[in-house]
Amino acid sequence: MRGTDSRASSLALFANREFLALTSVQFARGFSFATIILALALYADLFSASGIAAGLFGSAYAFVRFFLVLPLGRFIDRGNGKRFLLMGLLIYVGVLVGYSYVNTIEHVIFMRVFQGIGSLVVYLSATAVVGTISPEDGRGLWIGTYNQVRSFSSLTGDIVGGTLLFTFGFQTTYFVLIAVTVIATVAVFTSLRDNPSGSDAKPQSSGLETFKRLLGRSSIQALVAFRFLFSFGKTAVVLFLPIFARTQFGMSPLAIGAVLAGGRLTKTVAQGYVGTVSDRVGHLSWFIIAGTVLYAAGVAIIPLATVADSFGSLSLPGLLVNAQVTISGGAIVLFLAYAVLGFADSLRLPTSTTLFVDEGEHYNAVAGSLSLRSIAWQVGAIVGPLGAGIVLDYVSFAAAFYLAAGFTVSSAIAFAALYADEPIPEPVG
């Protein structure tokens, strides 16, 4: 059973200046990512992208991360996490400036490559720092709350980003994203300690030896297999659900953002609580399996939006305007499906991340463990969107989503078959 500090709570963590600075990074990253996902749906419609071309929006992002994630994780473990984090944020600012000049589908794919680089540096360095400075008996709470901020920021991206795109277009939207990222950069520079891991927390063996030791653990093997299979389905859904909403139902970016808000809201509310519960009861593998099976069910609901749309629309009184708001049956189904996906992620995300951090800490290689987590994801993230795009071009949207659901179920089966709760290894060296 994992311990927990009963004095701690998600809200109390924000009194910690370092945690607040790190969550500002998480907010900027999630806000930008969610808004850009909406923009990608608009680009796919604007440039009449085929399924394969739209799939490259996701595959190009993952491809560069696949090659960088392992060496970058080792560099962060051996170096100064704060400096890497600041470098990643500056790269991300440059990426957002670049998006402001996009006017062809090739430009979108090109910028997705650089977005992959900047987001990887920020993700690995920030998550490693959170895992390092958090107390061992409250790590689930720290990571759960940290991920909770990501969900809230993604929710903000869906609503605020969708509103900005709908009202002002691309240029103003990217200017706001740049400003938010710059504020996060200043917060890290002024509030986070230098070299958060400390001079005595260097890896105890070479990079290859550390990865071999990590992969020798059954829990890591299970997590890596799980991440590989799950990422195929997850990345296909994240990319193609907004495109599905835009191209099949003609939804505006504001409407698409409202649909995605269902999942963001459930993740925002639930992740910190799940992290606290997992600290108390243990059995993290149970949370991962339950969340994955539920995610597959949510994906299977998505194609039903086409059927629901044929039943007509629902009219509701407008909250901000003196008129009725019409919501299509397809939009309602997509909202409910994404809400299910959000709750499923709330079970899976804080617990799987905590397991990776715990395993990496045994070898003073938290970023190295997280890089294994990320590289397992990138393989599926390269193949998933492209594979779903091919199925979309030659079969249908429904077939692409059911294929994603199938890979999601297989990831739960693989994890359950491989996972074993091993004792903590003896210190190396």
Image (tube, rainbow, N blue to C red):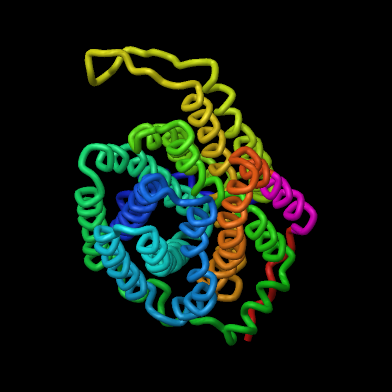
Q: Does any portion of residue 19 appear in the rendered image?
A: no
Whole-percent x, y for residue 135 in the image: 47, 59
Query: Up-down: is 40 above or below 215?
Result: above
The question of residue 407 being in magenta is answered with yes
Whole-percent x, y for residue 24 in the image: 30, 54
Q: Is residue 358 left or right of residue 199?
A: right
Query: Up-down: is 98 above or below 336?
Result: below
In front: 313, or 270?
313
In front: 290, or 88?
88
Q: Is residue 38 left or right of residue 417?
A: left
The quadrant in which residue 76 appears is bottom left
Whole-percent x, y for residue 128 in the image: 46, 66
Whole-percent x, y for residue 90 in the image: 28, 69
Identify the residue at the far right of this view: 417
In front: 389, or 261?
389
Query: Up-down: is 47 above or below 102?
Result: above
Would you say the magenta stretch is mainly helix, strand or loop? helix
Q: Which residues are magenta?
A: 406-420
Taking the spot 45% from the left edge, 60% from the top edge, the residue there is 134
Taking the spot 45% from the left edge, 67% from the top edge, the residue there is 124
